[in-house]
Amino acid sequence: MKSTLEKHYKIQQIRSLTDSAYVVRFDRNGIKFLPGQHILLGPPNQIEAREYSIYSGTEDDYLEVLIKEVVPGNVSRKLKRLEVGEELMFDGPVGYFTLNMRDVLSKKYYLIASGTGIAPFHSFVRSYEQLDYTLLHGVKYGNEAYERDHYEQERYILCTSRDEEGDFNGRVTEYLKQNEVDTDALFYLCGNINMIHDCFDILQQKGVDARQLQAEVYF
Ligand SMILES: Cc1cc2nc3c(=O)[nH]c(=O)nc-3n(C[C@H](O)[C@H](O)[C@H](O)COP(=O)(O)OP(=O)(O)OC[C@H]3O[C@@H](n4cnc5c(N)ncnc54)[C@H](O)[C@@H]3O)c2cc1C
């Protein structure tokens, strides 16, 4: 996406999680957002920017995003080369992949992510202390369990498709096929479009109504 971003925000910290995934923390400057919303980010003095879900919580006095460097990718690689003290260009927040407070207090949630699609769920969990959730995180390898200690361990299920380091060995779709789900719950899905389509089909076959499903497609 081409864009002219107007806000410049200073990078406070960069946490490297794997060879390709990293969390960037930067000044919040009073920005208000709803957990699940995303922002547009770009390197300084460039015209290209990309969408990134906000990873931090509403009570944090900084903003964070979780980014995976895509090869060959344009923006994610340039962002990875930035250092603490440098500036990011920023716009937003925008988006409707958000929770309804009444449901947060009364419903159970399944949060289903592939890869960095876990980012908005990190913000949900950090922002809504009372959230009743099961988080299914689908990755290739066990080392991609990004900051799993930030979640209640009995609520976080790592599904690994290329090694046996997960709580479940296989894709999230396979986990859903093999396990019962609470069909009264709300289901939020985020990440790769194929994963989202396949999960929709499986959940609908299990009796989940389309109105209980929400999705955010990354690519
Ligand atoms: C609403 C929204 C929120 C998003 N939030 C995040 C986020 O929190 N963290 C994050 O890392 N990304 C997120 N993305 C994806 C992000 O916007 C970029 O697409 C991604 O960083 C690649 O950008 P790039 O310029 O490096 O690669 P590009 O030059 O744009 O793309 C190169 C190729 O990589 C593919 N691709 C894009 N993302 C991935 C990926 N994760 N894995 C494998 N292939 C990919 C593209 O389809 C394309 O074929 C989000 C996308 C959307 C629409």
Image (tube, grey):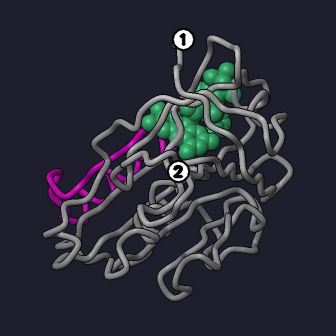
State the image coordinates of residue 108 (x, y, percent, origin top left): 26, 76
State the image coordinates of residue 148 (x, y, percent, origin top left): 64, 74
From the viewer's perspective, tell me whether residue 140 is left or right of residue 193.
right
Task: Please tell me in which quadrant of the rendered image residue 90 appears.
Answer: top right
Residue at coordinates 64% horizontally, 47% vertically from top-left?
26
From the viewer's perspective, tell me whether residue 150 is left or right of residue 112.
right
Task: Please tell me in which quadrant of the rendered image residue 217 appears.
Answer: top left
From the viewer's perspective, tell me whether residue 66 is left or right of residue 189.
right
Mark 2 lies within 8 Å of ligand 1 (Cβ measured): yes
Residue at coordinates 78% horizontally, 30% vertically from top-left?
77
Task: Please tell me in which quadrant of the rendered image residue 70 appears.
Answer: top right
Is residue 176 magenta-colored? no
From the viewer's perspective, tell me whether residue 61 is left or right of residue 22.
left
Asked if residue 193 can be seen in this view, the reply is: no
Asked if residue 101 can be seen in this view, the reply is: yes
Mark sitting earlier along the chain (2/1):
1
Instruction: Name the residue that disc number 1 marks.
Output: 2
- What amino acid type should be assigned to the residue bearing mark 1? Lys
Residue at coordinates 55% horizontally, 64% vertically from top-left?
137
Task: Decide which of 98, 176 is in the foreground and name it.
Answer: 98
How many numbered callouts?
2
Q: Which residues are magenta?
A: 191-219
Instruction: Name the residue that disc number 2 marks.
Output: 117
Residue at coordinates 71% horizontally, 33% vertically from top-left?
87
